[in-house]
Amino acid sequence: MHKSTSLFAAIILFWAASINGACAEDWRTELGAFRVGIAGGSDLAGAAARAEPFRLALEEGLSMPVEIFATRDYPALIDAATRSRIEYAVLSPLAFAAVKKSCDCFEPLVAASSGDGTDSYRMILVASADGPSGPQGLQGAGVGAVRAGGAGGLDLSLLELAEAGLDLKQAPNRLVLFDDGTQLLSALRDGEISAMIGWSTLSGDPSEGYSRGSLQQLVATGGDISKFRVIWQSTPIPYRVHAVRSNLDAEAKTALRTLLPAMFKTDPVAYDSIEPVYGGGFVAARPSQFTALERLLPQDEQSAAPSK
């Protein structure tokens, strides 16, 4: 009797283990291949080849085939994400906001961080040190900015500045657009504009213009940083985000949350192959980091473009 009971228990345990093992493999079998979407520009084959070390790292970490799905630009990548053609996407923050607002079918896993220790930047309003202390003091003045390049930073600035009391789309206020940052900084130094909209990490030594951004460029080109000050800053904007389908199996998400934050140290070649610009590794990302950018997108049309 005791032997029969033990045999029966062993059979039940074996059956349960077999079922659990089969379930663990179900998501891999169902997917067949794990597809990683990237915006590759005009050279799609070259972009996929450059990402090969990253693909191999994910393939090992997930224990299944991984494919690179390269698109020409972010709008095409957004379309692939919303149509369930990929499981993983490397997106600018505005592009991720577009996916989230369109279908809420992707969630952020990690975002890239920079070698200076920052994982975001802010748009800033810079005026002369003896000028107004806030945006409202620039009523009727000329404020310069670099023409929008699709990253969303200027649009976010205009939206949040209007909420702070400076609507640059309404007269007598003036928004003066320049082709590049060098022209913008020259106009600020020469007094052609009363203030400028730029960007900065706002991290590091203020006397050196912080670690990166418009003020750092001002110092690098011989400008006297003491003559200017930041009188407003926007909501933080994350760097590039890596996101997965919300309905991806929990085991896959857990594996990626373990693999990605450690990649910069454990497999720097793989990290650099997918994030050659941001040399600080991956940090955890949260949906709330993209809420401000979602406000820039119309309800009936979601589109985005590369970010810094």
Image: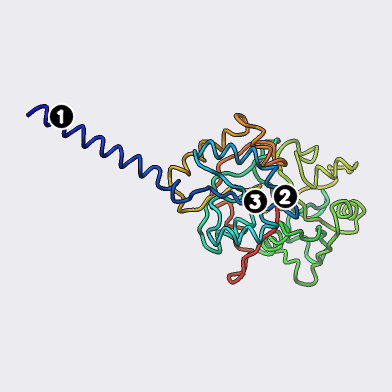
Q: Nearer the viewer, residue 218 or 64?
A: 64
Type of amino acid under label 2: Lys
| Residue carrying label 1 | 6
Which color scheme does this rendered protein use? Answer: rainbow
| Mark 2 neighbour class, 10 Å CA radius: few under 14, some 14 to 19, many 20 or more | some
- Circles 3 and 2, Cβ within 8 Å, touching? The answer is no
Residue at 62%, 66% in the rendered image: 302
The quadrant the N terminus occupies is top left
Mark 1 or mark 3, whichever is nearer to me: 1
- Observer-nearest of 297 and 16: 16
Residue under the point 60% across and 41% down: 55
Specify the label residue 256 is tagged with: none
Residue 132 placement: quadrant: bottom right
Q: Nearer the viewer, residue 45 or 127?
A: 45
Residue 163, x across and y down, in percent: 65, 63
Q: Is residue 214 left or right of residue 79?
A: right
Q: Amino acid at mark 3?
A: Ile
Residue 38, numbered label: 3
For label 2, the SS is loop
Lateral position of residue 286 relative to residue 218, left or right: left
Return the x and y of residue 120 as percentages of the image width and height. 66, 45
**Residue that label 2 marks:** 308
Image location of residue 192, percent across then percent down: 90, 59
- Secondary element under disc 1, as helix, strand or loop, is helix
User: Label 1 sits on what residue type?
Assistant: Ser
The number of numbered discs placed on residues in the rendered structure image is 3
Q: Helix or strand or loop: what does disc 3 sit on?
A: strand
In depth, the one of 135 and 169 nearer the eye is 169
